[in-house]
Image (cartoon, grey):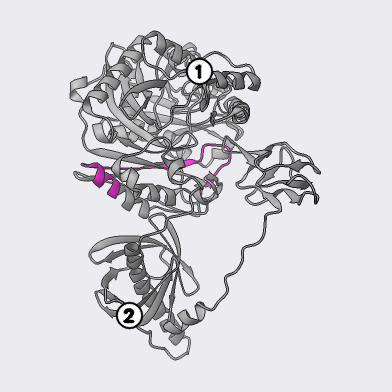
Amino acid sequence: MFKKILIANRGEIACRVIRTARRMGIATVAVYSDADRGALHVRMADEAVRIGPPPASQSYIVIENILRAIRETGAEAVHPGYGFLSENAAFAEALEREGVVFIGPPASAIEAMGDKITSKKLAAEAGVSTVPGWMGLIADADEAVTISRKIGYPVMIKASAGGGGKGMRIAWNDREAREGFQSSRNEAASSFGDDRIFIEKFVTQPRHIEIQVLADRHGNCVYLHERECSIQRRNQKVIEEAPSPFLDAATRRAMGEQACALARAVGYASAGTVEFIVDGARNFYFLEMNTRLQVEHPVTELITGIDLVEQMIRVAAGEALPFRQEDLTIDGCAIESRLYAEDPYRNFLPSIGRLTRYRPPAESRSPTAVVRNDTGVFEGGEISMYYDPMIAKLCTWAPTREAAIEEMRNALDAFEVEGIGHNLPFLSAVMDHPRFVAGEMTTAFIAEEWPDGFQGVTLPEAQLRRIAAAAAAMFRVAEIRRTRISGRMGNHERRVGTDWVVALQGAEFPVTIAADRAGSTVRFADGEEKRVASDWTPGQPLARLDVDGTPLVLKVGKIPMGFRIRSRGADLKVHVFTPRQAELARLMPEKAPPDTSRFLLCPMPGLVVRVDVAEGDTVEEGQALCTVEAMKMENILRAERRAVVKRIAAGPGASLAVDDVIMEFEPPPAGGKP
């Protein structure tokens, strides 16, 4: 077995590999860019080596930089994680020349299956059903349009060396094919150092289901069942689960056997994933093979009890798999929610900054429930603009899918993140969505259910009443504390009242509170009563309450006359008034938001890559105005209406913050084209 390995990656996957290596008694070496000098994976490793400036193209994907770190530390093997150099055959070959073991498949398998174009051809030759498409090289945007027309819209434009949703676009017409080709090629070049693009038919209403395979160097290959990855946004997985609620045993076996046959055909050894599109009749079509560890591997580990990183290390050391296919059963259900530094209220655009508060739910394991959080950040750390926006993977397991979903709901409720925009509210919304609960989702789920973007959750009245009762009880505790402090300062202590009006989500609930040492009984105007118990004290950002015998966890912030409460995807301003205050509040006019319609504002922190218009130009609705890059993704900003560009405030190369002005508009001349 190896004595020391180097992890050629960063973030949560580097931390994940370090944990298993430490358990196996193997010393670890971390590598880091200048942006990651104080990162968690650097702190966790036994040694750490600087490999360059922040951009990945100058640090994490520079092969010579990794080789230099290996020579400095004497590492015997390298685990590549996912992304970066994990599917780079040249990297695996360079390690072999260096006499260092690559903890992954042979370079020949990476070259055969890691390249999307080559893998499609090999799969077709092996008799595997594939999605129609164009596997040849595409010279330019004009050729991309011609090919797209032949295949028939919609089409998927994909980077040959891509992964993780990078370099992927769906095009429904010629304009989107032209723009998508250019953006995909740019992203592919910057993320993978390979700008080759291919195009295939986009299958509508598909499920994305993948098979985890594991092979050794002694001819053994097994499949560790499937993962359902259909909840995606911008072709990037958001929520995964194992097993799929859709597959039956016969389809699972057929997909698994086909995946293993493909792995054997290319001499595969290590962990890998064969991805399929599955239609409503359970017909499945090969998409690609990822010759690396997948982001979502924890759900497979939770239903099989197998540490995939450990098996990758043992296979690389020459050991045979310690189990056969018949030994691998499915135990319960596991779900993974990816926590991204993305603002769901701004169309999920990237968010960067300091994590002023980062408190994941406590990890736990019992015969009936597991909570696991794979992360690479810590409270006080910085979320950088240079890398992928995923900051944690929250996983839960339970004997049934229903119980695993409930465990995830509770874990998300208890996950505290402040300082950046993040998608926790959206993840909570998915967990409560009827289609997800029923297992009836496709890769179009998010686009279909939130076509106008995510604006938060409107809670049903039953849940509002639970929150209203909790808020009233909490406000009473805060008022008692406030009046006692006032009394100590020399004022007369006043009695805290029992009659209140709780206003939230456009509704008002008059309530009466009767308190005792064990809690409060909150009585509504219609006679309904709710018993509230909690040890919450004012100032605590997380309130754990019991309402009528059922747990309720709320994220709590103070606002005048009440609280900002976040729960199950809803972000609520909850005011607790006296009856007289409620009367007066109804008479207050609403403050109008500022008019920003004359400006194009930067929707996220990022770099202006291109400006497509000039001052004085007349632009039409939907016309591309500029492109902003953030966290390796290009975002094209478009005109919302016809207007004239009055002023351009930021040109290519400008680094912008959220809501910085990019350009200003004025109305088109009177009498012009309507």
For badge 2, the amino acid type reads Thr
Q: Position of residue 516 (x, y in %)?
A: 26, 79
Residue at image point 78% right, 41% down: 617
* Mark 1 to mark 2 CA distance (whole Å): 69 Å
Circle 1 residue: 91
First to last magenta residue range: 381-406
Asked whether the viewer can see residue 537, the reply is yes
Q: Nearer the viewer, residue 673 or 582?
A: 673
661 left or right, relative to 144: right
Residue 253's label in the rendered image is none
Q: Do the CB atoms of the residues marked 1 and 2 lie less than 8 Å apart?
A: no
Q: Nearer the viewer, residue 378 or 542?
A: 542
Circle 2 residue: 512
Label 2, secondary structure: give it.
strand
For badge 1, the amino acid type reads Phe
**Badge 1, how many Cα within 10 Å: few under 14, some, many 20+?**
many
Magenta stretch contains residue 495 = no
User: Which mark sits nearer the N-terminus, 1 or 2?
Assistant: 1
Label 1, secondary structure: give it.
helix
636 left or right, relative to 517: right
Picture layout, residue 333 above or below residue 454 = above
Magenta stretch contains residue 397 = yes
**Badge 2, how many Cα within 10 Å: few under 14, some, many 20+?**
many
Q: Can you tell which quarter of the image residue 537 is in?
A: bottom left
Q: Position of residue 292 (x, y in %)?
A: 41, 24
601 left or right, relative to 328: right
Residue at image point 39% right, 32% down: 17
